[in-house]
Amino acid sequence: MSSIKIAELRPAGSELFQDSESFLNELSDGQEMDMVLGGGRRSKRSRGGNVNTVNTIFNTVINTTIINTTIINKRRGRRPRKH
């Protein structure tokens, strides 16, 4: 059986955070942070824990996507879309 070794495994878009420049400070200047929603609540029911975990993970992925898209658009000189 062959084995595959991965030297470096990074999340998509992680190269944006490896620069010496930081665009994260610019996020607080505009309305981008107003679009960030999310978070999870703990369920008092024992059966609901998995659903809340999935919701929290989903919200984290969505928030990360919004922030990454904003950073990419700022680098490309694009203005954010108004919803």
Image (cartoon, rainbow, N blue to C red):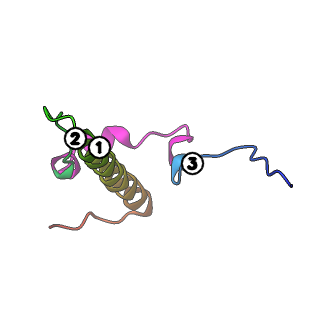
Give the labeled residue for mark 2: 47
Check disc 2 and report its element: helix, strand or loop: loop
18 inside magenta stretch: yes
Quarter of the view holding residue 18: top right
- Range covered by the magenta-colored residues: 16-34
Marks 2 & 1, CB-CB < 8 Å contact: yes
Left/right placement of residue 22 relative to residue 35 reads right
Crowd class of label 2 (few under 14; some 14 to 19; many from 20; radius 10 Å): few
Crowd class of label 3 (few under 14; some 14 to 19; many from 20; radius 10 Å): few
Could you tell me how far apart the alpha carbons at marks 3 and 1 are, in whole angstroms? 31 Å
Check disc 3 and report its element: helix, strand or loop: helix
Q: Residue at x 32, y 46 (%)?
A: 60
> In this view of the protein, which residue sits in the foreground, 77 or 73?
73
Q: Residue at x 34, y 66 (%)?
A: 78
Could you tell me how far apart the alpha carbons at marks 2 and 3 are, in whole angstroms? 38 Å
Could you tell me how far apart the alpha carbons at marks 2 and 1 are, in whole angstroms? 7 Å
Give the labeled residue for mark 1: 50
Q: Which mark is residue 70?
A: none
Q: Residue at x 20, y 42 (%)?
A: 48
Circle 2 or circle 3, nearest the eye: 2
